Amino acid sequence: MNGLGAMLRHEFRMLLADRIVWVVAAAILLLTGYSVQVGAAAADDQRTQVEQAADEERERYAGLRETMTSVHQGELSPSPFQDPTRPYVMGRARGQRYAVLPVNSFQATAVGQSDLIPPVVPVLLDGADPRGAREEIENPVHLLAGPLDLAFLITFLLPLLALAVSFDLLSREREQGTLALLLSQPVSARRIVAGKLLVRWGLLMGLVAVATLLSLLLFATGVAWQPFLFWGVIVALYLGFWIGLAALVNATGRESARNAVALAFLWLVFVIVIPAGVQISAVFLHPVPSRAELVALEREEVRQVQEEASAVLAQYYDDHPELLPEGSVDEVDFQTRAFAVNQEVQARLRPVRQNHREALRAQQDWIRALRWLSPTLVTHEALIELAGTGDARFGAFEEGVDRFHREWVGFFEPRIYTDSRLAPEDLDRLPVWTFEERSSGAAHAAAPGILGLLLFSALVLGISMRFLTDGGDRRWTP
Amino acid sequence: MLKAEALSKHYNGTPALSDLDLEVNPGDIYCLLGANGAGKSTTIRLFLNFISATSGRALVNGMEVSAEPLETKKYLAYIPEQVMLYPHLTGAENLEYFAALSGHDDYDRGRIEEFLTRSGLQKDAHHERVGTYSKGMRQKVGIAVALAKQAGALLLDEPTSGLDPEASNEFSLLLRQLRDDGVAILMATHDLFRAKEVGSRVGIMRRGVLRAELDPAELGHADLERIYLEHMHD
């Protein structure tokens, strides 16, 4: 190899002699530290919420057990609305259980949607809506105003830093006049550019990896290291794309100032314009009915069903005659009636809610499909999935909450309609929340992104290398 | 060693070089004389494959330049009119780097300093940053880069334009030494005096055409100047 080692050493030395590199290095170290700290704080906050919910539930249940025992032994006779042995009381606020999303082991690297979806959802007879006040799905533009987490730093700012050290990698040689002497040596322009790319890529990657590693060790708790490997691959490829883009622009043979403008423009297109366009088109093509409409509809249904309460109840017992307690429908107590009304309202709202969800899913699918238009979107998606704060894990959480809610209602429904009482032992038979992490893990979360980024980087590098063939009056020659 | 066969270069139909036939053998110093735009630099840039010929061939050591762009450069050393170097590095570091690229990554410090000294760069400047150098000093590092490459052919584009008379004279001595070592030298210049003094042949170019080839040994100074001016004014 014709002086390859010398070339890399030389490039590295030239880079270190450049003040901008030190500014970029300082920026990477400081911003990485800060952003990981932001992500770790968010993760710690979630951890605290989950722990507090568990503590509260445990204490409440200890109290319930005591009260129920006293009621059973006849020592206590609370009012029907306070009595935990009544299933309707137990199934609502007094006995509610929490569906909780544990902190993922790599969550400090990306806040993702975790600031939009509460990690603790109370599950009770009246419902369980993990989306809470959440109206919009993850919004790539939201990133702009969102927290400065590591994923934001990587996807938005790192390209700028990479371009700052590579926008003039060939044009500077021409402008300072060294290209003539350089190309009079038996070294191809491709080799020279490849050496420059390699050194810049290695330096930036080393800085980002070391800064991230140190920051995670310093600020984050319970980090798993296997995802870190995949994270490194994603960041390396994304960085490769941007540095490759700088090579491509340089290979067109314009002056440094023009390269800088062209690259700033490309940054704007890939990082701002395309993500915003994807988002706007998603909202436009797959509009989601407004939350306010849903709430108004819910009120209307409640009013109607209450008016028809007796009919609703009669209909229910017609369908389930075995549950009818002694006596007649007219004597069924207020709680059973309220439960029946509530269930009917839920049933009538289900298709509307379903519509709402499907519209959101359609938006999500649209955004996921269009993410291939910009490596920034591909990278962002891969990074939040790897951190466990993306659609996949939250989707699984939402499904889990639904399932748990159905189990919860299923446990109480027959007991309410038969107007039975709960014994303290029944506390151990209540449905218990569990969340199963996807077993496929980091590799599965990272694979599509890695493939996509491989394609993007190969494309820009391939084209720039084609432009850099010798001879033929190329514009970049001295 | 260097050979042009009907070598032509047109820019959008305008000829910069027309049907140049030329041969420089080991031990020759061929001086191309001519005004700016006569096609001297175009010729040199064609041999370096910085531009591609419109027609004809440029050969180095029997190989066609456009077919073997990297292989032919192993035999070529080049000193441009303005030698530009990395200003952050010292003269010695610049030389070391370019030597390594040319395949000589085994020169030790003593050898590097030897080349710089031979090129006339004063010792105390070897390890100064090039940013502090004068044009003449940079030119000398350029000469050292060419020496260190130990190439069979030397392409010079107005190499002495920034040198003072003394350095220019030293440079002439150096060229003669290289000629005696069997290097083929092609030098573009406006300097009739220098051409007469070192050249083994002189070619006069005008508007891309080689008008005359002379043997300076057969001519006096005045003759060369007269012939040159004749070709410039007809």
Image (cartoon, rainbow, N blue to C red):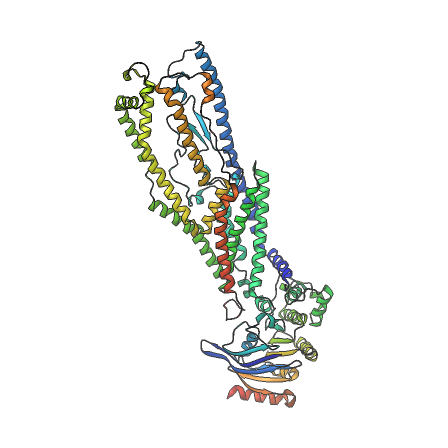
Q: Is residue B146 above or below residue A276?
A: below
Q: Based on the displayed image, in which of its 4 quarters is residue A81 positioned?
A: top left
Identify which residue is drawn at 38% across, 50% down: A277
Is residue B185 toward the left or the right of residue A118 in the image? right
Residue B143 lies, in percent from the top left, at 65, 72
Residue B133 vs residue A212, the one in the foreground: A212
Q: Quadrant of residue B196?
A: bottom right
Numbered label tally:
0
The residue depicted at 38 percent of the width and 28 percent of the height is A127
Q: Is residue B36 visible?
A: no
Task: Inspect this view and state whether residue A474 appears.
Answer: yes
Residue pictured at 49% horizontal, 51% vertical: A451
Q: Is residue B153 left or right of residue A91?
A: right
Give the answer, above or below, for where A226 lies relative to B102.
above
- Look at the image and tell me in which quarter the C terminus of chain A lies: bottom right
In front: A265, or B172? A265
Q: Residue at x 48, y 64 (%)?
A: A252
- Residue A138, percent from left and from top: 42, 42
In percent of width and height, residue A39 lies at 51, 39
* Residue sitting at the far front: A322
